[in-house]
Image: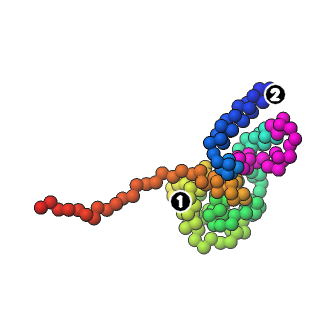
């Protein structure tokens, strides 16, 4: 038990050192994201009276999180899953459907038709332009290219969906994405001829 507390103390010191560098608003968003990712109920944590029971709560939540291996109850129907995540935009719905295909249907690589079919099965409104919605999700970093013209859910997409329906936490996950911009090609219109 003492070794476990030393490990927790070490983790605590690491977390504090990392959070010290952030402003208070970003500290709160980061902590909320971590709690959401670990499936820790914030109200349960704040109502604990002693530090040892708090450590036990966190350890239990971490154990549950590692057991689930980033998957939720695999028996959930797509309609239930989308109801729980409550996506408000096509972009969020694409992310949720991609997550469902990846974790509930063992389909990590998918095409637009797979997303549209699952959308229908989940009794969601039809996409006005599913291909454009998929492309928007790709540009945002939720989806990435896979093989044979298929797409797959990105690591940021995983965290984004897991944070839903908490939109602030989900947006915080997206803000952590770093894109490498491709250099723009500039046509040289001022070509001077030597005289």
Q: Secondary structure at mark 2?
A: loop
Is-magenta flag for residue 53?
Answer: yes
Q: Secondary structure at mark 1?
A: helix
Q: Which residue is the extreme one toward the right?
A: 49
Whether residue 113 sits left or right of residue 194 in the image: it is right
Residue at the spot x=59%, y=56% of the render? 142
Seen from the viewer's position, the closer of residues 152 and 136 is: 136
Residue at the spot x=78%, y=40% of the render? 58
- As measured in the structure, the alpha-carbon distance from the residue carrying label 2 to the one carrying label 1 is 47 Å
Residue at the spot x=74%, y=43% of the render? 65
Q: Which residue range is magenta in the image?
A: 31-55
Work out whether residue 107 can be spotted.
no
Q: Give the mark, 2 or 1, whose residue is nearer the N terminus.
A: 2
Majority secondary structure of magenta residues: helix
Q: How many tags in the picture? A: 2
Work out whether residue 185 can be spotted.
yes
- Tell me the number on the disc at residue 139: 1
Residue 84 picture location, percent across and down: 76, 60
Q: Which residue is the extreme one toward the top?
A: 2
Residue 54 picture location, percent across and down: 82, 39
Image colouring: rainbow
The image quadrant that residue 192 belongs to is bottom left
Is-magenta flag for residue 38?
Answer: yes
Seen from the viewer's position, the closer of residues 95 and 79 is: 95
Which residue is under mark 2? 1
The image quadrant that residue 153 belongs to is bottom right
Residue 29 picture location, percent across and down: 68, 51
Q: Counting other residues with Cα less than 10 Å from the Cα at mark 2, is it few (<14), some (14-19), or many (20 or more)?
A: few
Whether residue 36 sits left or right of residue 102 in the image: it is right
The image quadrant that residue 57 belongs to is top right
């Amino acid at each position: 038990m003492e070794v476990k507390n030393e490990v927790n103390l070490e983790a605590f010191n690491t977390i504090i050192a990392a959070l010290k560098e952030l402003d208070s608003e970003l500290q709160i968003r980061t902590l909320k994201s971590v709690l959401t990712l670990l499936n820790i109920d914030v109200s349960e944590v704040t109502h604990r009276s002693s530090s040892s029971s708090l450590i036990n709560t966190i350890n239990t939540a971490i154990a549950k999180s590692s057991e689930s291996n980033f998957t939720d109850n695999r028996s959930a129907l797509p309609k239930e899953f989308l109801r729980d995540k409550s996506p408000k935009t096509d972009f969020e719905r694409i992310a949720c459907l991609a997550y469902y295909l990846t974790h509930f249907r063992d389909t990590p690589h998918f095409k637009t038709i797979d997303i549209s079919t699952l959308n229908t099965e989940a009794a969601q409104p039809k996409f006005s332009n599913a291909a454009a919605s998929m492309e928007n999700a790709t540009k945002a970093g939720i989806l990435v290219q896979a093989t044979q013209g298929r797409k797959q859910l990105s690591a940021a997409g995983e965290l984004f969906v897991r944070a839903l329906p908490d939109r602030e936490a989900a947006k915080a996950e997206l803000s952590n994405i770093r894109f490498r911009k491709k250099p723009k090609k500039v046509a040289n219109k001022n070509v001077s001829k030597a005289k």
